[in-house]
Structures are given as structure tokens and as C-alpha cells.
Image (spheres, helix red, strand yellow):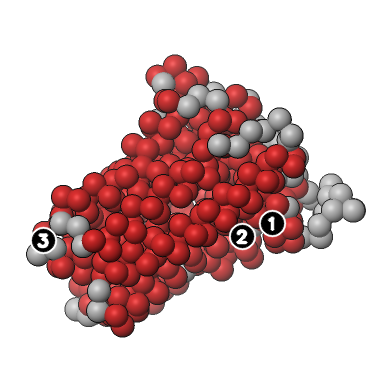
Amino acid sequence: MTSGGTIRALVGNREFRGMWIGSTVSTVGDQLAAVALSLLVFERTQSAAWTALTWSLTLFPPLVSGPLLGWVADRFPRRTVMVWCAWLQAALVALMAIPGAPLWLMIVLLVVVLMISSPFLAAQEASLPHVLPDKRYDDGVALFGTSVDVAQMVGLAAAGFLVTNAGANVALAIDAASFVWVAILVQLSVKHRPAADPRGTKRDPEGPKGAFTLLVTEPRLRSLMGMRLLAGLAMVPEGLAVPLAASLDAVWAVGLILAIEPAANVLGVAVLFRVVRDPAKRERLIGPLAILSLAPLVMFALNPNLTWTIVLLVIAGMAGAYHTPARSAWMRILPDAYRGRAYGIGRAALRSSQGGGMALAGVVAHSIGSVTATIAGAGGIGLLLATQATVAWRRARTRNDPKAVAI
């Protein structure tokens, strides 16, 4: 991701280190809990449908809790929010780990745990600009993002092995312990800071009345959000991984196709931050990289073989590194009093675009009978939208800072 010296500087920051370790550990724990509960459901019901439904439930709570609970991270001290959320999650997962607990109760508890994660993540994200100096902020966001990607992959890989050999209840107990560790780490390492917007008193009376209004009226925030929502089109190949592999007579490659996006993204972020050191220059690259993340998908109209499919997906995945500077620029532009709520809304919108894009792609592919044409169509639509968002981002940056020169 970044140079060894930069990583040492970030990890040497006590507050950042505590949040970073806590975030990574809790991400692995979340994968353990989701896999453990899914396997428990299958063992007790022998139903693939109920198992799939249980897994899908892990995707929906943030869509609701993000917009509804993000305000907590603005109205209360953010360290307090993180600590209390972690303790509540620890207690709820510990209840799930009790042998013989009813499945319905475990599912309800998991949904609540995932909902509580929204104010925790909002408080964590909104705290980073205060924890890190300006020159380290983008690097810190990049390290957070790549660490979460790696932790998700490691967590899913380890979860199946651990649950199978030690049992679902042991895996859940480990997850509960991970939340305890997070609570203690944050309490001991992060400084207490007053609430950003305790009763709405810190907001500009002449400014927008709500976070959503701010996000849709501020040109820079609006264009950045538009480019981030393009992930719903960029992830179409991932949603169609099984039929895509089947169309290539390489069903064995399903796992490979699914792994390309997160792995290529980690590599892309590493290259971007190693080659382009200046945050302002990275911001100018957000638009071109957004376009490049979708352009390779258009080439699926030529029905590429497996080798070229992998090449195209790797290029698209590496270009998807633009999300990291876009994320940090978005949070930097936001007034502190709005960061928690805005993060909750943005996270819900991003997840909706990803899930909705993949679901719609499945319907389209079934209707037209061609996986590659569906991927190419998503790429074409994405190119048009990415170009429009890039122009809007360039205008907004230039209007705000006449010295900003867009690429």
C-alpha cells in the first residue's frame, strides 16, 4: 500500500494503531460469526434455502442502520460510541455462543450486532481526520481499507476450517472475545474528544439542514458519491461469476474470479500510493481511474477466453483503487458535525448499489441469455456515468480551488 516508513509512522500513532488493530480483528470476527451461524442453520434445518437466507441477512442491516443510526456518532463523543458499541456487540455475540440457543434468537441477535456496527464504523471513520495529521490521513485511510479487505479474505478462509474443527459455538465465543478486545483497545488508545454536534448547535444556520441535503447539494460531495456508486456496475462480473465461469467451460475458476476484485484492488491501492505520493495528484486521478475501472468490461462484448477474462478483471480491479482517495477526499470535505450521519448514508448507498447492481445483472443475463453481453452493457453504461461524474468532479474542484488542475 504505502512505503515501510509510512506504515511505521501510522502504526506508531497510538490512536490510529488501536483503531486499526481493532477494526482488523473485528472484521475477522464478523466473518467467523456469519459462517458459524450459517453452518448451524444448515446443520439444524438441512435446508439450503434457509442457509442462504441467513447469509443474506448479514447484508441488509447496514442498509437500514447506516442512515438511521449514523447520527449517534455526531451527537455523542466518538470514542464513547465505539467503546459502547463494541461492548454491546460482545455481549450479544456471547449470548449467541451459548450451546443450544434457539436459531431464531441467534439470527435476531446477529442482525442487532450488525446494526450496531453502523454507529461504530461511523464514529471510527469520523475520528480518523482528528487522529491523523493531514499528511498521513490518506495513507491511513488506504491502510484501513486494504487491511479490511485482507481481513475479510482471511476471516472467510479461516472461518470454515475453525467452525468445522472446533464448532460453531467456539467460533462465536472467539468473535465475542474479539469485540471485548476492540472495546479495551479503543478505550485505552483513543483520546476522548467532545461530541461533534451534541444538539445540532455546531451547524451553520445558513447551511443545509441535514446530512442528506448536504450530500446532494455540495457539488464535490455529490460527484464523489456518484463515482463511488459506480461500484454497482463494476462488480457485475463478481455477481455473475458462476455463469461466467460456466460459459468459459471453467467452473473450477469461480473462486478465482471472485478473488480477483479484492486482490487486484489491494494491489492497485499499493501501486497508486507508491507511485503517486501527493494527495492532490491522487484526487485528480479519481476520475480517470473510475473510467478505467469500467472500460475493460466493455471488452467482454468480444467473448474473451479465460486468460483474457482474468486480465480484464485484474485491470478493472486495480483501477478500482480510486475508491480509496475518493473516500478520504469525501470525508475531508465533510464538515465534522455531519461526518457520522453522512458516513451512514454513504455506506448504505454504496452497499445498495453493489447488491442492486449484481441482482439486476442476474435478471438481465437471464433475460437476454448472455453473461458476457450483460457485463459489456454494464461497462458501457458505467463508462458514460463515470465520464459525466469525472467532468462534474473536475468542475467542482476547480470552482472550489482555481489552482486545481484536472487531468
Which residue is identified by label 1? 215
Which residue is identified by label 2? 345
Report the residue at 60% width, 24% height from top.
135
Q: Position of residue 77 (x, y in %)?
A: 70, 44
Q: Secondary structure at mark 3?
A: loop
Q: Answer with the quarter of the image where residue 241 lies.
A: bottom left
Q: Is residue 49 left or right of residue 277?
A: left
Label whose residue precedes the other's in the sequence (2 or 3): 3
Would you say residue 125 is visible in this rendering?
A: yes
Label whose residue precedes the other's in the sequence (1 or 3): 1
Label whose residue precedes the other's in the sequence (1 or 2): 1
Would you say residue 23 is visible in this rendering?
A: no
Q: Position of residue 139 (x, y in %)?
A: 51, 30
Query: Which mark identifies residue 250?
Result: 3
Q: Is residue 247 left or right of residue 3?
A: left
- Are the two marked residues, 1 and 2, in contact with CB atoms closer than 8 angstroms? yes
Q: Secondary structure at mark 2?
A: helix
Q: For the residues carrying marks 2 and 3, which lies nearer the camera in this image?
A: 3
Q: Secondary structure at mark 1?
A: helix
For marks 1 and 3, give the CA distance. Answer: 43 Å
